[in-house]
């Protein structure tokens, strides 16, 4: 089985580089966020940072990275203002899964 490459330290964006950090725990999105949230990654537009959970399978890390990359693309294009949170999550899941699958099977 093909091994997943190491995650990049940063990604390119027209609005500036985005750091990619592999972390033990994700920062809560709000003080009211549940402790058992099942997110595998996060994108913070203000700090230009993507965080990916360390304990994931390497291919799951790539899927999470591509999901968060898609959030970055949507935000950087200003398109986040036009999508409901549910639609945005579904779109990011779709693209992230397709990109990781393509990478794994290339």
Image (tube, rainbow, N blue to C red):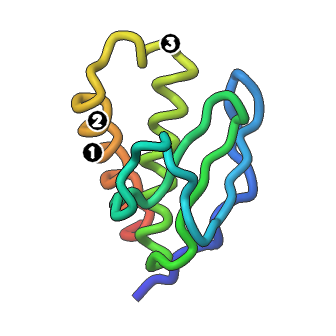
Q: Residues within 10 Å of mark 3 (few under 14, many from 20)?
A: few
Q: CA distance from mark 3 to mark 1?
A: 19 Å
At horizontal 39% and vertical 61% (from top left) the residue drawn is 35
Q: Badge 2: few (under 14), some or many (20 or more) residues near its Cα, within 10 Å? A: some
Across and down, in percent, residue 82 comes to 34, 11
Q: Position of residue 26 (x, y in %)?
A: 54, 58
Identify the disc placed on residue 94.
1
Q: Which residue is mark 2?
A: 91
Q: Residue at position x 32%, y 55% from top?
A: 97
Label 3, secondary structure: give it: loop
Please report contact status of discs 1 and 2: CB closer than 8 Å, yes or no: yes
Mark closest to the chain's N terminus, 3 or 1: 3
Q: Residue furthest front?
A: 32
Question: Within 10 Å of the Cα at label 1, are there few (<14), some (14-19), or many (20+) other Cα atoms?
Answer: some
Check the image and report above or below for 78 versus 64: above
> Looking at the rendered structure, which numbered label has been put on residue 59?
none
The answer to whether residue 61 is left or right of residue 86 is right
Residue at the location (40% across, 47% down)?
33
Q: Secondary structure at mark 2?
A: helix
Give percent across and percent down for residue 86. 23, 32
Where, by quadrant of the figure, is residue 14 drawn? top right
Q: Residue at x 50, y 76 (%)?
A: 58
Q: Nearer the viewer, residue 42 or 77?
A: 42
89 relative to 53 in the view: left or right? left
């Amino acid at each position: 089985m093909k091994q997943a490459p190491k995650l990049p330290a940063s990604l390119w964006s027209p609005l500036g580089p985005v750091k990619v950090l592999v972390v033990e725990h994700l920062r809560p999105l709000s003080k009211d966020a549940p402790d058992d949230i099942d997110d595998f990654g996060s994108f913070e537009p203000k700090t230009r940072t993507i965080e990916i959970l360390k304990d994931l399978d390497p291919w799951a890390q790539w899927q999470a990275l591509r999901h968060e990359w898609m959030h970055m693309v949507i935000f950087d294009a200003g398109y986040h203002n036009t999508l409901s949170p549910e639609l945005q999550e579904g779109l990011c899941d779709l693209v992230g899964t397709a990109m990781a699958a393509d990478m794994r099977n290339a």
